Image (spheres, rainbow, N blue to C red):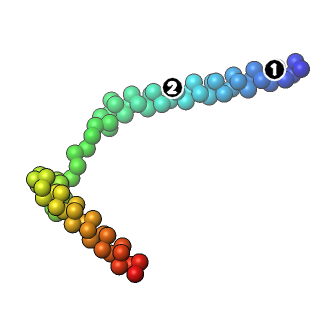
Amino acid sequence: MKQSAILTVLGMTVVFAFLWILVVCINLAGRLINQLGLDKDVPPQKQAGSAVQNNAPPSEIAAVITAAIIEHRKTKMSGIE
């Protein structure tokens, strides 16, 4: 019984120490990434044919989405028949 208690305490201590070291490493990595400025958002690259990124009016965007849905339904239905 004494050996079981010792192994239990030893096992919990090892797990606690590992978790503590893991938390410290994650915090240090976060600080390093913040100091290097690697956490800044990168602006998205503009694509030539995209209606959304060219600031098209919402009606054009809705028309493009509707046309894509209709075309998808046509091709899906023709594959079933």
Task: Name the residue that disc number 1 marks.
Answer: 6
Could you say where residue 19 lies in the image, as x and y percent from the top left?
59, 27
Horizontal relation, residue 43 to residue 15: left or right: left
Residue 29: quadrant of the picture? top left
Q: Is residue 54 visible from the viewing direction of this image?
A: no
Closer to us: 50 or 34: 50
Image-quadrant location for residue 54: bottom left
Disc 1 element: helix
Q: Does residue 17 appear to the left or right of 79 in the view shown?
A: right
Q: Quadrant of the N terminus?
A: top right
Q: Earlier in the sequence, mark 2 or mark 1?
A: 1
Quadrant where the image shows the C terminus: bottom left
As helix, strand or loop, the secondary structure at mark 2 comes to helix
**Tag of residue 24:** 2
Residue kind at label 1, given as amino acid type: Ile
The amino acid marked with disc number 2 is: Val
Query: Relative to 29, does residue 48 appear above or below in the rendering?
Result: below
Where's residue 65, x and y in %?
22, 60
**Is the residue marked by circle 2 packed among few (<14), some (14-19), or many (20+) residues within 10 Å?**
few
- At horizontal 32% and vertical 38% (from top left) the residue drawn is 38
CA separation, marks 2 and 1? Answer: 27 Å
Q: Position of residue 20 (x, y in %)?
A: 57, 24
Residue 43: give x, y in percent of width and height: 22, 45
Q: Which mark is residue 43?
A: none
Task: Tell me if mark 1 has few (under 14), some (14-19) or many (20+) residues whose alpha carbon lies within 10 angstroms of its own.
Answer: few
Name the residue nearer the viewer: 44 or 37. 44
Which residue is at a point 70% across and 24% down the rendered structure image?
12
The quarter of the displayed image where residue 46 is located: bottom left
Q: Of the residues tagged 2 and 1, which is closer to the observer?
A: 1
Say which of 49 and 61 sits in front. Answer: 61
